[in-house]
Image (spheres, rainbow, N blue to C red):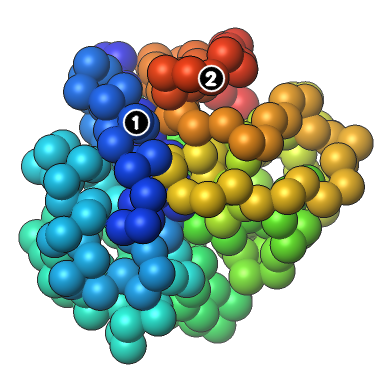
């Protein structure tokens, strides 16, 4: 069974209308909408969700599977995020959950919550990975493990990355850097591994203000700063296709396909 995921992170700034331009892409693309954190700025408060996010990406709330970012946690406990998306994000109060999209198992994780090998989130994920035998898997969260953009590589999900590699997960999506980046397949230590590696995409292009790129990494296969748009993933039984769709006014695009490991 084929399924579609479409989305981005770093989305709605109430001082700007850029998020309306990316929401317009969602209006014409079917499938499950995903978010890679920092859904609304500056503080992820419920009032900001209702007055800003809700009027653009919120048009697709009933088909959205979000993840939180650090800006959600500027409101204590990410209370605005949990209230706005109540009933759509698994167990109340947890920032992580899983679901199936077609034949794929998908994990939405919380990179602002503890994610070390001793954390509840890590142990939950380990149990989920061990309890199913599907061929294709994907995970998304906010802070990227590898990153040529704003803040560079970040450590929050490093142990989770190792766990995902050990279980043959195929794709990871992240945000935080307000740009688009696609990496080659990488192993547990970030070394290219074309046979078993995880391919990471950074899609911080949902509408937030642009950030400056840092040093381009050798494993980066595609990179664009100062662009708005969303990533569309077509999930097939044995592989996937990707397409970056730019908002009106931008021309950058990126597309390709790969098989599950």
Left or right: residue 203 versus residue 47 is: right
Q: Residue at x 59, y 77 (%)?
A: 116
Residue 220 position in % (x across, y down): 79, 33
Q: Residues within 10 Å of mark 1 (few under 14, many from 20)?
A: some
Which residue occupies the foreground of this view, 32 or 227? 227
Residue 131 position in % (x across, y down): 37, 52
Look at the picture and state if 175 lies above or below 121: above
To which quarter of the image does residue 97 belong? bottom left
Q: Residue at x 9, y 60 (%)?
A: 87
**Residue picked out by circle 1:** 21
Which residue occupies the foreground of this view, 199 or 33? 33
Residue 37 seen in this snapshot: yes
Look at the picture and state if 36 lies above or below 135: below
Q: Residue at x 22, y 55 (%)?
A: 52
Label placed on residue 250:
2
Residue 107 seen in this snapshot: no
Q: Mark 1 falls on what kind of element?
A: helix
């Amino acid at each position: 069974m084929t399924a579609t995921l479409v989305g981005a992170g770093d989305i709605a700034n109430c001082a700007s209308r850029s998020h309306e331009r990316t929401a317009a892409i969602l209006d014409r693309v079917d499938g499950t909408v995903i978010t890679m954190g920092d859904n609304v700025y500056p503080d992820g408060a419920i009032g900001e969700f209702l007055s800003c996010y809700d009027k653009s990406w919120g048009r697709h709330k009933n088909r959205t599977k979000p993840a939180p970012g650090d800006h959600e946690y500027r409101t204590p406990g990410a209370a605005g995020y949990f209230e706005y998306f109540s009933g759509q994000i698994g167990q109340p109060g947890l920032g992580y959950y899983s679901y199936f999209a077609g034949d794929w198992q998908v994990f939405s994780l919380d990179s602002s919550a503890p994610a070390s090998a001793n954390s509840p989130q890590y142990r939950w994920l380990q149990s989920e990975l061990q309890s199913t035998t599907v061929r294709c898997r994907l995970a998304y969260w906010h802070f990227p493990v590898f990153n040529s953009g704003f803040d560079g590589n970040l450590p929050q999900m490093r142990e989770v990355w190792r766990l995902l590699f050990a279980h043959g997960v195929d794709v990871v999506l992240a945000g935080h850097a307000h740009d688009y980046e696609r990496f080659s397949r990488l192993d547990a230590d970030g070394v290219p591994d074309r046979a078993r590696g995880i391919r990471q995409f950074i899609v911080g292009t949902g509408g937030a203000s642009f950030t400056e790129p840092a040093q381009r990494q050798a494993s980066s296969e595609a990179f664009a700063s100062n662009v708005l748009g969303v990533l569309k993933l077509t999930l097939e039984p044995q592989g996937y296709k990707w397409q970056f769709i730019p908002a009106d006014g931008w021309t950058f695009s990126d597309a390709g396909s790969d098989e599950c490991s």
